[in-house]
Each structure stands twice: as structure tokens, then as C-alpha cells.
Amino acid sequence: MSQVIFVSQCRRDEIIADAALRQTQVVLTRHDDVGWQVQKSRFLGADEQGRRLFVALPSLGGGTGGFVPHCGELLGITFRRGHKKCLFNAKVTSIDDDTSVGLELRWPDELQELQRRAYQRACPPPGRQIEVRFWAGESDWPDGSPRVGVLEDISAGGARVRSNDPGDFAPGQSIRLSFALQSKGPELVIDAIFRHRESRTKGVCSLGFQFVGLETTQEGQAMLSRIARVVTDFQRAAGRRQQFLQSRGRGR
């Protein structure tokens, strides 16, 4: 099962305490007036009885400057554990420039796990075309017409879209995507960061987007669960198609 799974409180505490003890690498996500920011960091330790977590400040942990959270701010946090990715959000309770302390976070109320295979790219089945509308910024709808493309592949972490080259898009820019993964399913509107473009032919490009902020809200977690289920469906369809083609080849 690849949908988001909420673990029990006891199991949550075990997972987090173990990750903190190992000083596991984490990815921090925050939102400010400029847009979404994503930065790598690592656990520094935990005080389970005091319900506190300690995470390195990104600027002190090998990251770049500019990632400056504030007390009371809610951060999205993800880390890997075996074949799963763990997600939670936590409020910043204290900030210390001391590299042994860094960010102090409140112990999370909930922890979700997602199979890491959901973060592997999956293409829509042959004959299935999924339209994607996208625009710069984080408004609910652009002032003008949105750009339109076709979904090339998708994972729980992002998507690639084939479209005419939006020459004014720059890596790191905040983008909003809108698409429906199922013909009778809901329209998903997702915040993303534009990562790269790959030229195809005659002005057509493959555009790479990284989803951000899904772990920070219940609505985002629900969307992440929907995406993970569809990714699994696409992966299974690709597996069945490959088996069918192989069986036909053996039958000749």
C-alpha cells in the first residue's frame, strides 16, 4: 500500500527518536513572503521526555544562506527510513546559532510514512493524456491565461510536463500546477518549484517541477495520498503491459 499511512503514537516516537539518534539527514520546507524554500539539514538529537527535537540550521549544515525560519513557524520535515519516507510538520520553538543546538522544534503530533517507490517516476498509460495547467506565482488563478502542457511522468515528489518553452521561468521559481489525475477525480492544485527544462524539438520542452508543502497541511497530505495511489496504479499498468509484450514475444 503506497498511500500515506499515519503511524501509532508509540511507533511515531520510536521512529523519530531513532532518526535523531542516528542524526539522519532531513529535508526542511518552509513558506515565506517570497515563496517556498527547501533545504537539506540533519537531526542533531532529541529530548523525548521534554518533547523537543533539534535540527541543524541549514546555513550551518552545509546549505546556502537565506533559509531563516522564525519562532512559532511551522516547518515541513521529511526523511528516509529504509524503503519508506517519513513526513511530519513541527513548530519552531527556539533558534540558536550554536551548531550543537540549531533549531529547536516541538515534538510532532503525527508522523506519516510513504513507500519510497511512490517517489519513482511513473508515466501515464499509453493513450491516456493528462492536461496540466501551470502559472508563475502562488495565486489561486493567474491574471491571464495559464500555460498548458501534457503530463509526461509523475511521482509523489514532482512531475515532468511537456509544453512550449516558457522562457521566462527560472530555476527555483514558485509555480502552481493544476491537473486531474483521474477522469472523474478532483482537480489538484499544487505548489511547486520549477527545477529544469530539457529541450525537445521546435520550441517544445520537458519541464521539471518539484512539489512542495504537501506535508505541511492535512489537505496537502490528502493530495499526496491521492498522487501516491495513482503513481502505484501507473506503475502496475506499466508492469502488466511489459509482461504482456514479453509473453507475446515468447509466443512468436
Image (tube, helix red, strand yellow):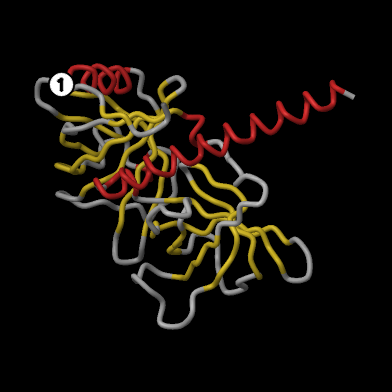
Quadrant location of the C terminus in the rendered image: top right
Instruction: Indicate whether 4 appears above or below 82.
Output: below
Instruction: Name the residue at 34% across, 50% down.
Output: 213
Residue drawn where x is 37% and y is 32% of the image: 42
Query: In the rendered view, does 18 fall on the left or right side of 59?
Result: left
Judge whether 135 appears above or below 28 on screen.
below
Left or right of residue 40, residue 77 in this image: left
- Choose between 126 and 103: the one closer to the eye: 126
Residue 137 falls in image quadrant: bottom left
Whole-percent x and y of residue 218?
A: 24, 45
Most foreground residue, 206 or 246:
246
Residue at screen point 35% across, 23% down: 23
Residue positioned most to the right: 252
Q: Amino acid at mark 1?
A: Glu
At mark 1, the secondary structure is loop
Q: Crowding near pointer 1: few (<14 within 10 Å), some, many (20+)? A: few
Rendered residue at 38%/33% (across/down): 3
The residue identified by callout 1 is: 48
